Image (cartoon, rainbow, N blue to C red):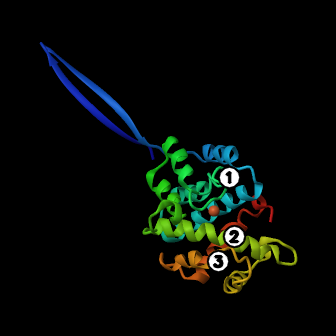
Amino acid sequence: MQKILKYYWIFARGSMVIILVMEVEMSKEITRERAIELLNEYIKNPSMIKHCLASEAVLGAIAEHLGEDRGKWAMAGLLHDLDVEITNADLHVHGRETVHLLKNEGVDGEIIEAISLHNELSSGKKRSTKFHHALAAGETITGLIIAATLVYPDKKINSVKPKSIIKRMKEKAFAASVNRDIIRECEIIGIPLAGFAEISLKAMQGISDKLEL
Ligand SMILES: [Fe+2]
C-alpha cells in the first residue's frame, strides 16, 4: 500500500484563488521483484539466498494461519538477512545496515522494525509484537528444518515428517547453532510448537524446487 501525505495551500490574490498541492510519499510497498534484486546484489552465498526464500515461505504461511498480512510478513522473511554479508554476520550490528537500505527503498516501517528486532542484540530492543516474534521464530526454524532434511536418507524435504522436527528440537547437540528458545517464541504468538513445525515444514516443502532439497 502506497501512503501519500497531501499538503494543501490556498492563497487568495485579488479575485484569484490559488491552490497548491504538495504530495509526500511516506512509504510504499516494495515489489518482490525489487526485493529479489536487492538480495542478489547484497548476498552472494546461494545457501543464504535459499534461507531467505525459506523464511519468506514460512512467514507467509504463519501470517495466513494467524489471519495477518501475508504479503507483509513474507516480505520481512525474504529481506530479514539482507545485510548478513556486508556485516560479516556480526550479531552486534547485523540488521542495522538492512534498516538503512530498506528505509532508502521506502519500505513499510513495520517490516523494517520486525527485521531490526529479529536480532535483539543489534537493535537494543526487545521483541513485543506477533510480527516480531513470528519473524524471529520463523526464520530460525528454517535452519532446523534444513538440518533435519540433510540427515534423512534421501535428503528430500518432502520426506521429512513434522515429528522429526520436534525430535531434533529436543536434541541440543543437533544443529547446535539453531537457537531453540527463539523457535519457542511461536508459543508467545499462540501457535504450539508442534503446529508451528508442521506449518513451517509444509511451507518449505511447497518450495522444495527453489530450495533444491
Ligand atoms: Fe535469517
Q: Residue furthest right?
A: 153
Whether pointer 1 and pointer 2 mark residues with C-beta atoms closer than 8 Å, the reply is no
Q: Quadrant of ligand 1?
A: bottom right
- Residue pictured at 57% horizontal, 79% vertical: 181
CB at mark 2 closer than 8 A to ligand 1? yes
- Residue pictured at 61% horizontal, 66% vertical: 139
Q: Image quarter for residue 129?
A: bottom left
The x, y position of residue 114, in whole percent, is: 49, 60
| Residue, disc 2 | 143
Q: Amino acid at mark 1?
A: Glu
The x, y position of residue 154, in whole percent, is: 87, 74
The x, y position of residue 73, in whole percent, is: 53, 60
- Residue pictured at 67% horizontal, 71% vertical: 202
| Residue, disc 3 | 198
| Residue, disc 1 | 85
- First in sequence: mark 3 vs mark 1: 1
Q: Secondary structure beneath disc 2?
A: helix
Instruction: Tell me: 27 left or right of 12.
Output: right
The x, y position of residue 132, in whole percent, is: 49, 66
Foreground mark, 3 or 1?
Answer: 1
